[in-house]
Image (cartoon, rainbow, N blue to C red):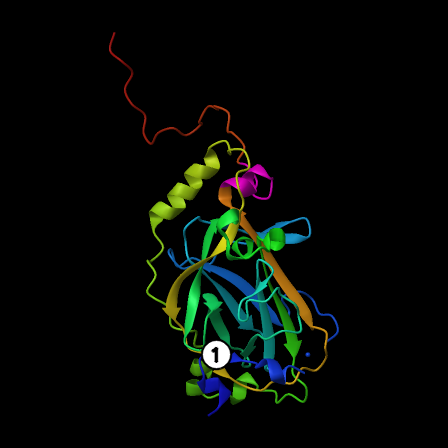
Amino acid sequence: MSLRRRLLALVPFALLAAAGSAQAGRLVELQIVDRESGETLTQYPFRSDSFVAGAPGHRYAVRLINRGNERVLAVLSVDGVNAVSGQTAATDQTGYVLDPYESTEVAGWRKNMSEIAAFEFTRQSESYAAQTGRPGNVGVIGVAVFRERNPRPVYRSKIDATTEGEAKRAPELPPAAAPSASAGAARDSMARRESAPVQESLGTGHGQREDSGASYTSFRRASDRPAEVVSVRYDSWNNLVARGVIPRPRPQPDRPNPFPGNFVPDPPVR
């Protein structure tokens, strides 16, 4: 069966064999999707990092987009833990293989070849990493990307409609609520308020089990060094505002409005 017809592909530990440096995000784009709202979270650049604001209690998924015409191996780390094996993350470990131009969403810790435990934003002390005695890297999601040795490039002009649709298909997730106007309004209201002091940071919990199929495939790395490492950090909205990552809105002084109405009213009768 062709790999493009499979939902996900894992590299068995026995087949791990593993490329210079590249601009971050040039090979694989990393996005974080709030599964409760359906929104792709905005990334805020701050110094040398990129941040997203997570909502406590919300499930999320890591969207990986292969931007090139060759297969790549993506070794995914969440809070310093390999999302497939549960090991303390290292770049020579197992990961997900993405077909050319494929986009997929990893929504949890892999428990077996048919199930995951959902990623969910929670307090740092309740994160899976902290609960397993590894709190040192909570708050960061990263992917190490490897090129394939002797790849077979696929060009968009040669992908038929059916194959391209399959290549872009993501794992099936439970239905998420559509983005609501109230979510944006609540966020705007929160931004307008003076931010609270920094509270306990967010981490990623070990949520409920969900169906999510995967299959094994072979992949020989072009090098034992990743071609690129892409990462994004996360915390709550309040904490990011308090730390200066998200700009605090400036209060607007009361100023006369030169155009307060539409027509000229009559003066009051005296």
Q: Secondary structure at mark 1?
A: loop
Magenta stretch: includes residue 239: yes
Query: Can you give x and y, in whole percent of width and height, for residue 199 in the image?
Result: 52, 38
Neighbour tally class for label 1: few under 14, some 14-19, many 20 plus, Cα within 10 Å: many
Query: Can you give x and y, in whole percent of width and height, for residue 80 in the image?
Result: 60, 60
| Residue drawn at 65 percent across, 53 percent down | 49
Q: Which residues are magenta?
A: 238-248
| Residue drawn at 29 percent across, 16 percent down | 267
Magenta stretch: includes residue 111: no
| Residue drawn at 59 percent across, 44 percent down | 245
Q: Nearer the viewer, residue 258 or 198?
A: 198
Most extreme residue toward the left is: 269
Query: Can you give x and y, in whole percent of width and height, for residue 170 in the image?
Result: 43, 74
Determine which residue is flagged by label 1. Answer: 8
In the image, residue 11 sits, relative to residue 128, either above or below, namely: below
Q: Nearer the viewer, residue 208 or 140?
A: 208
Most extreme residue toward the right is: 20
Q: Is residue 176 left or right of residue 135?
A: left
In the image, residue 235 sits, relative to residue 28, either above or below, namely: above
Quadrant of res 250? top right
